Image (cartoon, rainbow, N blue to C red):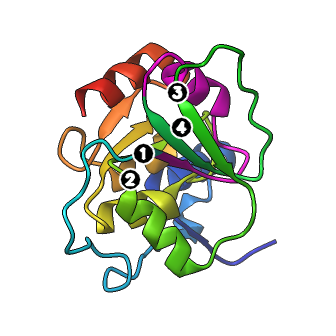
Amino acid sequence: RTDHTFLLSSEQQNYIERRWGVGSKTSVVWQHVDTEYFKPTTTAVDVHGPVFAIGDDHGRDWKTFIEAVADLDIDVIIKTRHKINRPDGMRCRVKQISHRLTFAELRDLYAQSSIVVIPLKTTLNVSGVGSVLESMSMGKALIISDNPPIRDYLVANETCRIVPIGNSKAMQLAIKQL
């Protein structure tokens, strides 16, 4: 039994109200990011820099991401400990980083990237919120799957491109357009 629960999105609050009728015993506190640390670099961004995708939680949809980039002639960096299944004959060049990075190394990956992609599955948690805020703070072009709990942090076509969950073609199109 709890007296009060702190949450990271209004969708989580709505879910708790629908499921247990105790939404009034919750507060949305919002995720934060250090915008002084994760800030745009002063060097010019290479528009042909790699596409960077990141995430270790259960809400990442690596299958859809790989399908989206597989036949593109681009460099891709994936930061995750999850095993990524890469089909034979992929045109894209994938570098996977599975080990833990320092904050400086992570910030450098954001800085060198032309686009950040957060591929999501449907979840109840705010999957990807840290990566979303870090990307935005760094001034990066961002593509994200439309998982309802993350919507509080997004403004479609202003702060990011939102694509349907599981839709590799829409994700690929967004990558090509950016």
Relative depth, front residue between 1 and 89: 89
Mark sitting earlier along the chain (1/2):
1
Would residue 75 be seen by someone viewing this image from the given angle? yes
**Which amino acid lies under the numbered mark 3 shown in the image of this protein?**
Cys
> Mark 1: which secondary structure?
loop
Q: Nearer the viewer, mark 4 or mark 2?
A: 2
Q: Nearer the viewer, mark 4 or mark 1?
A: 1
At a point 39% along the width and 28% down the height, the residue shown is 163
Percent position (x, y) of residue 75?
47, 38
| Left or right placement of residue 169 versus residue 142 in this view | right
Would residue 27 be seen by someone viewing this image from the given angle? no
Q: Is residue 63 part of the magenta span, yes or no? A: yes
Circle number at residue 92: 3
> Mark 2: which secondary structure?
loop
The reply to whether discs 1 and 2 touch (Cβ–Cβ < 8 Å) is yes
Q: CA distance from mark 4 to mark 1?
A: 16 Å
Q: Which residues are magenta?
A: 52-73
At a point 42% along the width and 45% down the height, the residue shown is 50
Quadrant housing the N terminus:
bottom right
At a point 75% along the width and 64% down the height, the residue shown is 99
Percent position (x, y) of residue 31?
46, 71
Q: Residue at label 4?
A: 119
Q: CA distance from mark 1 to mark 3?
A: 10 Å
**Which amino acid lies under the numbered mark 2 shown in the image of this protein?**
Ser
